[in-house]
Image (cartoon, rainbow, N blue to C red):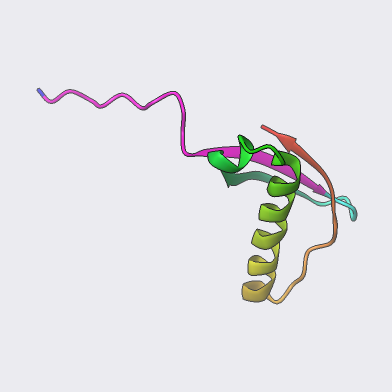
Amino acid sequence: MAKKSKKTAESEFVLFNVLYEDGSRSSNRRIPREMVASLDADRDIRAAIEAQDREIAEKSGRPRGPVKKIERV
């Protein structure tokens, strides 16, 4: 019988919930772990989420509003 590989406790990503100024919410946004460990983590996380929003808006044709709050899951 084959052994199941155990998943490491640390994953490559950290999850965040994003609240927008219009009241909408986006859950479980994935940000690379190395961005969270940097000195300017808050600025880097916000920049990564805003870049993801721009990419999503380009594909869907519906822009997201400004980010109000970011909380780690």
Q: Residue 20 placed where, x, y %?
A: 84, 52
Classify residue 32 as left or right of residue 67. Answer: left
- Looking at the rendering, which quadrant does residue 4 occupy? top left
Q: Is residue 21 above or below residue 62?
A: above
The residue shown at (62%, 74%) is 59
**Residue 47 % position (x, y):** 71, 54
Q: Which residues are magenta?
A: 2-19
Residue at the (46%, 28%) spot, across then down:
10
Point out the image quarter for the N terminus. Answer: top left
Q: Main secondary structure of the magenta part?
A: loop
Would residue 6 be counted in the magenta stretch? yes
Report the front residue among 53 and 60: 53
What residue is rendered at 66% in x and 32% in y?
73
Q: Is residue 16 visible?
A: yes
Vertical position of residue 8 compared to residue 38: above or below: above
**As rendered, which of 49 and 65 lies closer to the eye?**
49
Frontmost residue, 24 versus 13 = 13
- Judge whether 5 appears above or below 69 on screen: above
Q: Is residue 14 magenta?
A: yes
Residue 12 percent across, percent down from the top left: 47, 39
- Across and down, in percent, residue 50 comes to 72, 58
* Residue drawn at x 85%, y 58% as measured from the top left: 66
Q: How many marks?
A: 0
Q: In this rendering, does residue 26 appear at all? A: no
